[in-house]
Image: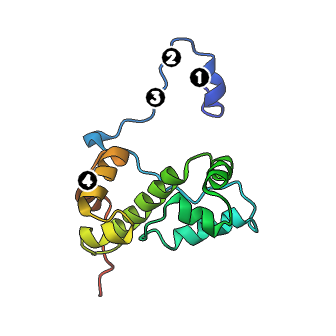
Amino acid sequence: MNPNFPEVTASKEPGAVHAPPYRRGGQAQYVETPLSTRAEAGDQLAATLEWAMQRLGQPLPVKVLAAHCALSPRHFTRRFRDATGTTPHQWLLTQRLALAQRLLETTDQPIDHIAASAGFGTPAAMRLQFQQALDTSPAAYRRTFRTPAPSAA
């Protein structure tokens, strides 16, 4: 296998198995998901996404997002999917999970406060989403990824 061009060499090795690296302990790989949109910066949809990011702790049904974007819910959903490649619901869930992950990593806030701040409402709802998306619980995620506070030396 040529280390300079692994994709070329890998495709020429019939029967070779190419798999992502194994992580001990059943640990899933967590990658921060940035705000991703193909919308132009001055676009009303991009402004609505930015607006929603500032309000993740609030209920944000499609009807509210569409009204902010000055579109009907149906037209908003079509434009949203075209611009982001996903549904408004899935996008919100991804953003809420990312916010909860950042808060778990960087703060000592109780999990119930993080669940409310990230828009899950209850710790049980956040636990369910963490389990489905990340295959772990919020408490286990915090234990694994908590950034230690700087020591006052």
The crowd level at tag 2 (other Cα within 10 Å; few <14, some 14-19, many 20+) is few
Q: Compare marks 2 and 4 and give the one earlier in the sequence.
A: 2
Q: Compare marks 4 and 1 and give the one earlier in the sequence.
A: 1
Instruction: Residue 39 in the image: state x and y as whole percent.
Output: 72, 58
The quadrant of the picture occupied by the C terminus is bottom left
**Disc 3 target residue:** 19
40 or 66, nearer to the observer: 66
Q: Vertical placement of 9 versus 121: above or below?
A: above
On residue 16, the disc is 2
Q: Is residue 101 left or right of residue 82?
A: left
**Disc 4 target residue:** 137
CB atoms at circles 2 and 1 under 8 Å apart?
Answer: yes
Instruction: Residue 3 in the image: state x and y as whole percent.
Output: 60, 32
CB atoms at circles 1 and 3 under 8 Å apart?
Answer: no
* Gap between marks 2 and 3 measured at Cα: 10 Å
On residue 10, the disc is 1
Q: Amino acid at mark 2?
A: Ala
Count of picture labels = 4
| Colour convention | rainbow
* Gap between marks 1 and 3 measured at Cα: 11 Å
Q: Is residue 149 left or right of residue 65?
A: left
Q: Vertical placement of 75 versus 109: above or below?
A: above
Q: Compare marks 2 and 1 and give the one earlier in the sequence.
A: 1
Q: Residue at x 52, y 73 (%)?
A: 54
